[in-house]
Structure formats: C-alpha cells, structure tokens
Amino acid sequence: MEFPVDIWLRGDNHATTEMIAPVEREPRAWTDGDVAAVLIGMLRAIDRARNPGAAADRPVGLRGFSWIVDPFEPGGVVIALEMTLGAVVAGPFDVSESVLSGMIQRVMDAEKWKTGEVENWKSKSKVH
C-alpha cells in the first residue's frame, strides 16, 4: 500500500511530500508489525530528507519522537511524528483513531522492552 508522507525539517520554511510503501495490507487489516513498518518508513523518509546520501536500510529505532493519531477532515486519520529533526505526517488512513492509537502504543511499548529501556527505568527508580 502506497501513501503520502509530508515532511518538514526544522529550519526549513516549506514541507515536501513523498510516497512510501512499507506495507502491503490496507490499514484496517494492519498488524502491530505493519504499524511498526509504517513508523519505520516514516522515520526513514524524514532521514532521507535530511541525509539524502544515507543508506536506505540504515537502522531505525522507535524512540526519540512524539506521536499522535489525528482525524483528517475529509475522512480517515493521519499519523504525525515530531522530533528535534522536524515532523512527518502520513495518511490519511481508513481506520479507527482508537484502534490505530492502540496499535502504535503497543508497538512503542514493545520497543521499550526490547531496548531494555524499561529495565533501565526500574534500576534508576530503586530506593537505596
């Protein structure tokens, strides 16, 4: 499935749009793995905008950004990611806002466990 992403780099006065196709399924059939692929595709798109010569398959971590799923006026929802580098917005997607938000939250939570972030938080919060 191909969809547009709007990319704004901090310090630029304009946004650019490109098409990406990180998943095959339509949004209502997405799995958590598909959602992770969409987020990674969005992060790679903003990375390409900032670093055009970078490797296309450069490793991407699902951390260091804020996200929101927001209704899109004509219909559907968009995913917006914001970070120090800038912002990237993808969509619109024909899927429920609450369903997509829940999937993104699960993906982000799983990433925290995978990277050991949660264990780091636990160790820092121990009372001595």
Image (cartoon, helix red, strand yellow):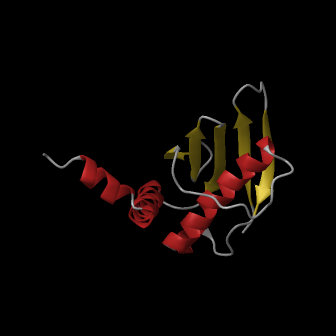
Coordinates of residue 11 in the picture (x, y in percent): 73, 25
Q: Please identify the quarter of the rendering in which residue 108 is found.
A: bottom left
Residue 15 sits above or below residue 71 on the image = above
Name the outermost residue toward the right.
Answer: 53
Coordinates of residue 65 in the picture (x, y in percent): 53, 44
The structure residue drawn at horizontal position 51% and vertical position 51%, both measured from the top left corner, is 63
Q: Please identify the quarter of the rendering in which residue 61 is found.
A: bottom right
The structure residue drawn at horizontal position 62% and vertical position 62%, both measured from the top left corner, is 38
In the image shown, does 57 or 22 lie closer to the viewer?
57
In the image shown, does 34 or 10 lie closer to the viewer?
10
Answer yes or no: is residue 72 visible.
no
Say left or right for 16 vs 91: right
Say left or right for 6 vs 100: right
Coordinates of residue 68 in the picture (x, y in percent): 49, 45
Coordinates of residue 60 in the picture (x, y in percent): 63, 58
Say left or right for 32 vs 38: left
The structure residue drawn at horizontal position 51% and vertical position 46%, both measured from the top left corner, is 67
Residue 66 sits above or below residue 95 on the image = above
Q: How many marks can you see?
A: 0
Q: Please identify the quarter of the rendering in which residue 103 is found.
A: bottom left
